[in-house]
Amino acid sequence: MALFGFGKKDEDKVSEEAVRAALAQVKDPELGEAFEGKRVHAVEIRGGAVSVHLRLGYPAAGVREAIRQQAEAALRAVEGVQVAQVTLDWVIEPHAVQKTLKRMPQVRNIIAVASGKGGVGKSTTAVNLALALQAEGAKVGILDADIYGPSVPRMLGAEGGQPTSTDGRSLEPRMAHGLQSMSIGFLVGEDNPMIWRGPMVTSALQQLLNDTNWHDLDYLIIDMPPGTGDIQLTLAQKVPVAGAVIVTTPQDIALLDAKKGLKMFERVDVPVLGIIENMSLHVCSNCGHVEPIFGEGGGARMAEEYGVELLGQLPLTMTIREQADSGNPTVAADANSPTAMIYRDIARKLAAKLARRAKDYSTRFPTIVVKHD
């Protein structure tokens, strides 16, 4: 790329080729790819001073400083470089969705978080994953798609009070911990059961998705209802999803159902970005003893079997449950804890996997209207 508006000067002691060759030795920590091509957004050279702007396609606040330091060290090793300065940012592009659907205008990417069965901690994982993506530097929202058993309002501490509307047509998302959120639980009391048939549930979810005034989101996390029945399949066919994540425990029975969830997304042309193994190890709160209560290696075996990535393994600890129940999830309540760091590692891996997929360029092309005189 051209130098930040500065031409090559005779007194420059360092060539841009040498700078780019040095940067190519630095690897993207999530994708393992060299910083070259579009990842090197701009280079400025003035004598022995080199300034470089690197750019990623996914949020990476947790590793930005480490990348910056590695790149500056590589540049200082170039002959003639006296001063090296590196900045790093990211631009999150919209990615392709199912061929029969169009992307939502104010949501760049929808990611479905699903499981084949209930009881594996899917909703807790979805909420913390949304918070982790936000902590990494993205604009994030979460949609609670579980009409029968909405839990996101309680987990975000946002229960009580209905969403407002500024135009009489759309609902404003409820804000909690910086996240934009929407759930049927905001509209119906906690104690009121939703005794609806499948078509009504599907219609309600589509209204919650499309009639919410989402504000410029990089990612919208959809906490899917458990199971792989008609409702889940219909939702997967009608919601423009860029990718899906499967949450499971290592237990064999949970894995059987998780595999059905994965196959469901394959059937409707939604790429599965990876598997999250929840409750991998139990850590005793008294003595610290670690024990694999639900078995070992199940998520890894499933990932290998289906050719997807195991994004991470989360422990079974009392604090995760307590923090979610209190409306202050782990990533928000204890941002520097080891568990919060696991969620953030998973979020970066997930976002990086999506960044490698095909982009959606449909909005960049003008609409052609043919008029007949």
Image (cartoon, rainbow, N blue to C red):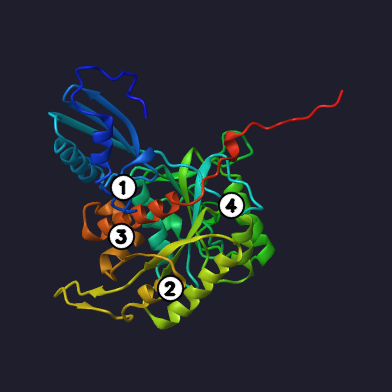
Q: Nearer the viewer, mark 4 or mark 1?
A: 1
Q: Position of residue 351 (x, y in %)?
A: 40, 51
Q: Is residue 115 above or below residue 90?
A: below
Q: Nearer the viewer, mark 1 or mark 3?
A: 1
Q: Nearer the viewer, mark 4 or mark 3?
A: 4
Lower position in the chain sequence, tag 1 or tag 2: 1
Q: Position of residue 252 (x, y in %)?
A: 41, 82
Q: Secondary structure at mark 1?
A: loop
CB under 8 Å between callouts 2 and 3? no
Q: Which of the 4 image quarters holds residue 239?
A: bottom right
Q: Nearer the viewer, mark 1 or mark 2?
A: 1
Q: CA distance from mark 1 to mark 3?
A: 39 Å
Lower position in the chain sequence, tag 1 or tag 3: 1
Residue on which disc 2 sits? 119
Lower position in the chain sequence, tag 4 or tag 3: 4
Q: Is residue 117 visible?
A: no
Residue on which disc 1 sits? 34
- Residue most extreme to the right: 373
Residue 240's disc is 4
Residue on which disc 3 sits? 323
Q: Position of residue 231 (x, y in %)?
A: 62, 66
Q: Is residue 10 left or right of residue 77?
A: right
Label 4 sits on what residue type? Pro
Label 2 sits on what residue type? Gly
Label 3 sits on what residue type? Gln
Q: CA distance from mark 2 to mark 3?
A: 17 Å
Q: Position of residue 212 (x, y in %)?
A: 56, 44
Q: Which of the 4 image quarters holds residue 139?
A: top left
Q: Secondary structure at mark 3?
A: helix
